[in-house]
């Protein structure tokens, strides 16, 4: 929360539009610093970076130059895509190769899959009819 507002104030007071690389580096440093402090204090870094991102997007990016704002958006999208891909790759590989040594309870897997499909159907089809 505070880091987003501090970065907005800092970027508003200090005009770095003539040095976009420095502006980009300081923006990343200011935005990710609360995550490191939260991890240092054994607090939730994920929650910290979530609220920092919300406030930085709302208040700090409007003080960036247009080129830096586009670069920040592209880099954050790239990092999010890379993280999502690695997480799904890890989950997929652990589900395939993790079952080799583990005892699988197929009855539980079947009921869980059935519950997911029924829950999805009970949510998607009524919402689809309301939306259309």
Image (cartoon, rainbow, N blue to C red):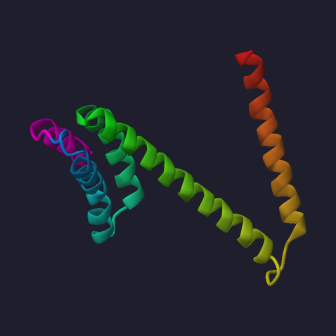
Image quarter hosting the C terminus? top right
In the displayed structure, 24 sits above or below 124; it is: below
The percent coordinates of residue 99 (x first, y second) are 80, 76
Q: Residue at x 31, y 57 (%)?
A: 32
Question: Is 41 situated left or right of 83 in this image?
Answer: left
Quarter occupied by residue 29? bottom left
Question: Is 78 situated left or right of 5 in this image?
Answer: right
Looking at this view, name the residue that lies furthest to the front: 18
Looking at this view, name the residue that lies furthest to the bottom: 101
Q: Main secondary structure of the magenta part?
A: helix
Q: Nearer the viewer, residue 86 or 107?
A: 86
The percent coordinates of residue 50 (x first, y second) are 39, 48
Q: Nearer the viewer, residue 38 or 79?
A: 79
Q: Nearer the viewer, residue 88 or 109?
A: 88
The percent coordinates of residue 124 (x first, y second) are 76, 31
Q: Residue at x 48, y 54 (%)?
A: 79
Quarter occupied by residue 86? bottom right
Quarter occupied by residue 84? bottom right
Q: How many marks?
A: 0
Q: Which residues are magenta?
A: 1-15
Specify whether residue 5 is painted magenta: yes
Q: Residue at x 10, y 41 (%)?
A: 14
The percent coordinates of residue 24 (x first, y second) are 28, 49
Q: Residue at x 73, y 65 (%)?
A: 92
Q: Nearer the viewer, residue 92 or 63?
A: 63
Specify whether residue 54 is painted magenta: no
């Amino acid at each position: 929360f505070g880091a987003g507002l501090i970065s907005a104030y800092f970027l508003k007071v200090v005009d770095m539009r003539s040095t976009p690389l420095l502006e980009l580096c300081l923006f990343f440093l200011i935005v990710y610093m609360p995550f490191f402090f939260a991890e240092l204090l054994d607090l939730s870094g994920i929650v910290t970076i979530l609220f920092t991102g919300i406030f930085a997007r709302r208040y700090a990016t409007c003080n960036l130059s247009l080129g830096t704002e586009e670069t920040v958006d592209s880099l954050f999208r790239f990092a999010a895509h890379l993280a999502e891909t690695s997480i799904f790759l890890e989950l997929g590989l652990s589900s395939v190769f993790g079952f080799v040594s583990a005892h699988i309870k197929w009855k539980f897997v079947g009921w869980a899959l059935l519950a997911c499909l029924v829950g999805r159907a009970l949510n998607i089809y009524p919402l689809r009819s309301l939306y259309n």
